[in-house]
Amino acid sequence: MEGCHQMEIDGRVCSYVEFTTPKTRILVLRGEKGLIGCGYLNMSVAEKIDEALAVVRGVQSIEDILSAEVRLVSSAAGNLGVKPGMTGLEAMKILA
């Protein structure tokens, strides 16, 4: 299901987008404090603009993001308490 949608995480409404390119699927889930997404996202840009970003890899759906292991964390996300190794859901509870 492509496009922009909403879901509730830990009592807060979060937005997510999912769409396909000719070669891959792009997934991003955004909360009030930051976002989590697939490996397509650029961590160096997030660092440059001080964005709270967590990246997971090998995901095909938003549900996969929530169960996947966080691999990369921007400094801003780390300052909020997001850490590599936590699940996407644990990270989104912080970023929501």
Image (cartoon, rainbow, N blue to C red):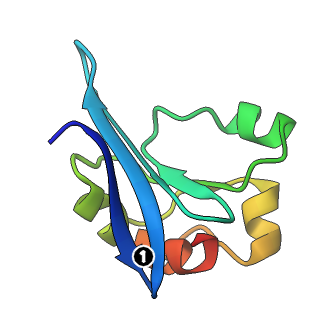
Q: In this view, does 73 lie above or below 69?
A: above
Quick check: 58 left or right of 70? left
Where residue 4 appears, as percent x and y from the top left, is: 34, 43
Looking at the picture, does residue 20 appear above or below residue 47?
Answer: above
**Residue position marked by numbered label 1 in the rendering:** 89
Residue placed at 53% from the left, 57% from the top? 71
The quarter of the picture where the C terminus appears is bottom right
Work out whether 1 lies above or below 13.
above
Instruction: Please identify the quadrant where the N terminus is shown.
Output: top left
- In the picture as drawn, the residue positioned furthest to the top comes out as 22
Percent position of residue 60, x then y? 22, 46
Query: In the figure, 3 relative to 16: above or below?
Result: above
What x and y, as percent, mark residue 42?
A: 61, 32
State left or right for residue 55 relative to residue 26.
Answer: right
**Residue 55 visible in the shown view:** no
Count the numbered circles shown: 1
Q: Residue 95's quadrant in the figure?
A: bottom right
Q: Which residue lies furthest to the bottom in this view?
A: 11
> In this view of the protein, can residue 14 be seen by the observer?
yes
Tell me: 39 left or right of 45.
left
The structure residue drawn at horizontal position 54% and vertical position 73%, both measured from the top left corner, is 91
Query: Within 10 Å of the Cα at label 1, are there few (<14), some (14-19), or many (20+) other Cα atoms?
Result: many
Left or right of 22? Residue 32 is right
Q: Name which residue lies at 46% across and 65% down.
A: 14
Q: Position of residue 29 (x, y in %)?
A: 44, 54
- SS assignment at label 1: helix
Kind of residue indicated by mark 1:
Leu
Q: Which residue is drawn at 80% across and 59% down?
A: 76
